[in-house]
Amino acid sequence: MSLPPKALRSSIAHYATFPQSPVSLSQLAAFGRRVDPGVVLRSSMFLAEELPIRLARRVQELDMLPEHLADAPSIKRVKQWYSTSFAELVSHPRPTLSRELRALLSRSAASSTPLPRATPNPNPASSFRSPPSSSPSPTSPQSTKPRQRIPLERYFATATSEPGTVFPPEIYAYNASFRSLLEGIKRRHDPTVPAFAQGILEWKRVSGPLVPANPRRTQARDRMIQAALERFLMARIGIRLLMSQHIEIARYEEQQRNGELSPPPEGEFWVGAICTNTNVRQVALVAIENARWVCERHYTGLLEAPEVQLFCDEALTFPYMPGHLNHVVFELVKNSLRAVVEAHSSRNPSSLSGWTHSEKFPPVRVIVAKGEEDITIKISDEGGGFPRSLGEKVFDYSYTTMPGGRLEEGFQGGEETAPLAGLGFGLGMSRLYARYFGGNLELLPMEGHGTDAFLHLNRLSSSSEPLY
């Protein structure tokens, strides 16, 4: 069922007035430890309310992008994806619950195991808020007083149904249909980051430099765009996290009920998409191998990428999403490999022929340390570094050291299949992944020698999402 354009715009404006409900990794993990149809149903009910609110806010943000960035064809395509997903969610039929089942699912949090307490995200809130404006949009989330919502604990209390509770067939059917809906939405949104990168390139080709040249106005424009993209992409991480977590616990419940469960890899314990004992060394090894493979594929004729040395306790584990950790380590190692290859090549790196790491390139070093609050990963290279004057600019989504970056028309892949460099989103997205649950990413360059990247991860997993 699709909504007429006018009704869709009105519905988006309505949902955007409601507040979002931030969660932490530890809360998601606690909720999904014991999975049954009631758990899946409560998760479905929460997401059927939460996701339209988050999507509506993102659609409105796309409308308010500064400097005509919203007019770029690829940005319009992203807006269409989000609008379509919003319409599908609000039009999806809700289940009819009997009085008895409704009473069971509405049990107060006081009679259930309480959720772990979330701590405030330590990253500066100003990083994710809209800049002050004297004339806010009448439909913007900031222009309307937020409405009240059912508390998170009403959905995510960790005790749900009594053992042996019999659920009606329509509950199983609804859980299956809602999971299928989220799988389709998640696939639709897979190319969002590459599409955003392409939209920036399209906008830059059309807008060009400010004429007459005005450095102060240019800096102000770039800051506005950076803040807008940071908010949107940070929110996208949370939307995908919630969808991934629900899809995985719903799939687990179905497989458990049908006797089709496959044992997890030895020593791993998963709650949905969260691995409660993520092995840092194992994730890093996979990310390193993938980054070296991409490096070898990118530089034609390069037989073997520079060596990457990993120093990490084999038994170091903590609760995290391995996909997030893999993404960030992959991006950082990929950047270091590229810097090393290009800094130590005496000819055009795109035509390398027959060099191996042992003959030509210094190694990249990855060192992992565990503290009381953080797990820190240091990635050091001898790729020449960069001037300190660049500062935060290296995290800008319109910044790249690779000229002429572009995606093929109609590119539909995710971040993993995008080019090695040239889109300007790698470091910015990596820092967002690190910050999302209380970590951070810092770069310390030594110009003329190399760069040290420090990836800080909150090992307690108690930090809430930085929603605004």
Image (cartoon, helix red, strand yellow):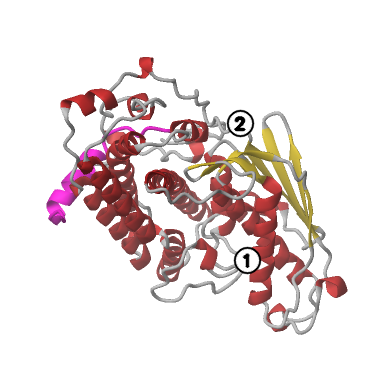
Expressed as whole percent of the image width and height from the top left, the position of residue 237 reads 46, 47
Q: Earlier in the sequence, mark 2 or mark 1?
A: 1
Which residue is identified by label 2? Answer: 460
Total numbered circles: 2
Q: Is residue 371 above or below residue 278?
A: above
Toward the viewer: 72 or 413?
Answer: 413
Expressed as whole percent of the image width and height from the top left, the position of residue 443 reads 69, 49
Residue in the picture at 40% in, 46% down: 239
Give the spatial CA distance, label 2 vs label 1: 36 Å
Question: Which element is circle 2 on?
Answer: loop
Q: Amino acid at mark 1?
A: Thr
Q: Is residue 145 left or right of residue 390?
A: left
Q: Are marks 2 and 1 in contact (CB under 8 Å)?
A: no
Question: Which element is circle 1 on?
Answer: loop
Q: Amino acid at mark 2?
A: Leu
Q: Quadrant of residue 357?
A: bottom right
Toward the viewer: 72 or 120?
Answer: 120
Q: Is residue 27 above or below residue 265?
A: above
Q: Which residues are magenta?
A: 1-22
Viewport quadrant of the C terminus? top left
Q: For mark 2, does the 10 Å Cα neighbourhood hold few (<14), some (14 to 19), or many (20 or more) residues?
A: some
Q: Which mark is residue 401?
A: 1
Residue in the picture at 55% in, 54% down: 396
